Image: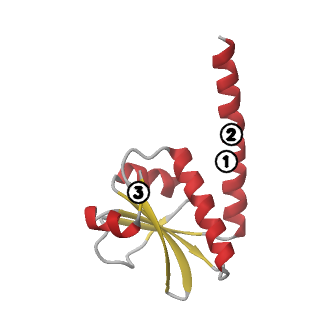
């Protein structure tokens, strides 16, 4: 379930973090990237709670994705080839990935392909 960041951290103070590091600086670009990441997470169907926050720091803007369950964080981190970091206190695990235009295009393409697969699966099930 997607929740507010403050509520999420209150309930899961030692969550699992996956951070997208972006050079984008305009609010609309950041909002678009956050929305894209939210669509990807939804497609991965997390089993536990998760939340997202936009964080400014370390000379960039980061989109933080916090997960209650390590398996949910692992799925996102694996999909985005995130690498281990040790930048923030309190998280059980933390990884980061470069959230640039190339990554955005790859996510968009993966979502497009998965939507086609889902549609075909539904058509096949309806025909059965």
Residue 2, given in percent of the width and then of the height, sits at: 44, 55
Left or right of 80: which side holds 74?
left
The residue located at (49%, 87%) in the rendering is 58
The residue located at (41%, 57%) in the rendering is 50
How far apart marks 2 and 1 lie (CA) works out to 6 Å
Circle 2: element type: helix
Residue 13 visible? The answer is no
The correct choice, above or below, for 4 with respect to 117 in the image is: below
How far apart marks 1 and 3 lie (CA) works out to 20 Å
> On residue 50, which mark appears?
3
How far apart marks 3 and 2 lie (CA) works out to 22 Å
Residue 20, given in percent of the width and then of the height, sits at: 54, 69
> On residue 111, which mark appears?
1
Residue occupying the far bottom of the picture: 59
The correct choice, above or below, for 112 with respect to 5 in the image is: above
Residue 90, given in percent of the width and then of the height, sits at: 28, 73
The residue located at (58%, 59%) in the rendering is 37
Mark 1 and mark 3 lie on one chain; the one further toward the N terminus is: 3
Circle 3: element type: strand
> On residue 94, which mark appears?
none
Cβ atoms under marks 2 and 1 closer than 8 Å:
yes
Given residues 103 and 116, the one toward you in this image is 116
> On residue 115, which mark appears?
2
Is the image coloured rainbow, by chain, by secondary structure, or in one colour? secondary structure
């Amino acid at each position: 379930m997607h929740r507010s960041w403050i509520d999420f951290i209150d309930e899961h103070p030692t969550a699992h973090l996956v951070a997208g590091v972006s050079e984008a600086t305009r609010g609309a670009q950041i909002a678009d990237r956050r929305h894209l990441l939210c669509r990807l997470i939804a497609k991965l169907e997390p089993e536990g709670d998760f939340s997202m926050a936009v964080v400014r720091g370390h000379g960039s803007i980061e989109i933080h994705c916090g997960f209650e369950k390590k398996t949910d964080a692992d799925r996102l981190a694996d999909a985005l080839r995130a690498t281990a970091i040790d930048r923030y206190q309190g998280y059980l695990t933390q990884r980061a990935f470069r959230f640039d235009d190339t990554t955005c295009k790859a996510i968009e393409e993966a979502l497009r392909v998965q939507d086609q697969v889902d549609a075909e699966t539904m058509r096949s099930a309806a025909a059965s």
